[in-house]
Image (cartoon, rainbow, N blue to C red):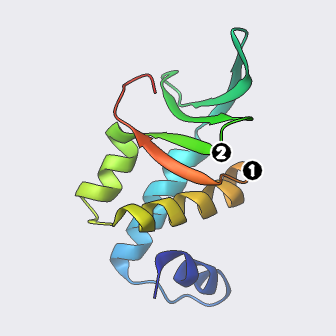
Amino acid sequence: MNLVRKYKIHRLSPCLNDVELEIISFIENQLKVLKPIKKHNYPKTTYYVNSDDEIILQQGIISDKLWVRHKDFWGVLQEKYLLEYVEIQDIIRYMVLIHLKFRASIPCFSIDKSI
């Protein structure tokens, strides 16, 4: 069963194992500290920065992609938790909807430090 589906069920009745709970907690901790900002030279793009003003997410109005910082976020899900690319896309898409209240169509990772 995929992680998003299990998470939805878990919200009604706890069913996630310890590793799955750790993944969810990791993502929630990453998202809850983000604040949206707009840059004057890119008015159609919203950047989500952490407390160190590092860009973690980038969502363009025109683009149908949500850029996710590889270092400290996407890479952790891929390397530490061994999630597949599509699993990461699905869980980020769902968690962004729940926590940041916007619909991300295609999450992608960015290796560039500043996205």
**Residue at the farthest top position:** 41
- Label 1 packing within 10 angstroms: few (<14), some (14-19), many (20+): few
Residue sitting at 54 percent across and 56 percent down? Answer: 28
Q: Please, is residue 73 above or below residue 87 in the view?
A: above
**Which secondary structure lies at badge 1?**
loop
Marks 2 and 1, Cα distance to the nearest angstrom? 12 Å
Residue 7 placement (x, y as % from top left): 56, 78
Question: Mark 2: few, some, or many residues within 10 Å (few <14, many ≥20)?
Answer: few
Task: Name the residue tied to disc 1.
Answer: 102
Query: Which comes before the other along the chain, label 2 or label 1?
Result: 2
Say whether residue 87 is left or right of residue 82.
right
What type is the residue that disc 1 sits on?
A: Phe
What is the x, y in percent for residue 58? 58, 33
Q: Percent x, y for residue 61?
A: 74, 35
Q: Nearer the viewer, residue 28 or 67?
A: 67
Q: Is residue 73 above or below residue 103?
A: above
Q: Residue at x 70, y 49 (%)?
A: 100
Residue type, numbered disc 2? Asp
Disc number lying in front (2 or 1): 2
Which residue is labeled 2 in the image? 64
User: Looking at the picture, how far across and down is residue 2, in whole percent?
Assistant: 47, 81
Q: Secondary structure at mark 2?
A: loop
Looking at the rendering, which quadrant does residue 77 occupy? Answer: bottom left
The mark total stands at: 2
Q: Nearer the viewer, residue 61 or 30?
A: 61
Image quadrant occupied by the N terminus: bottom left
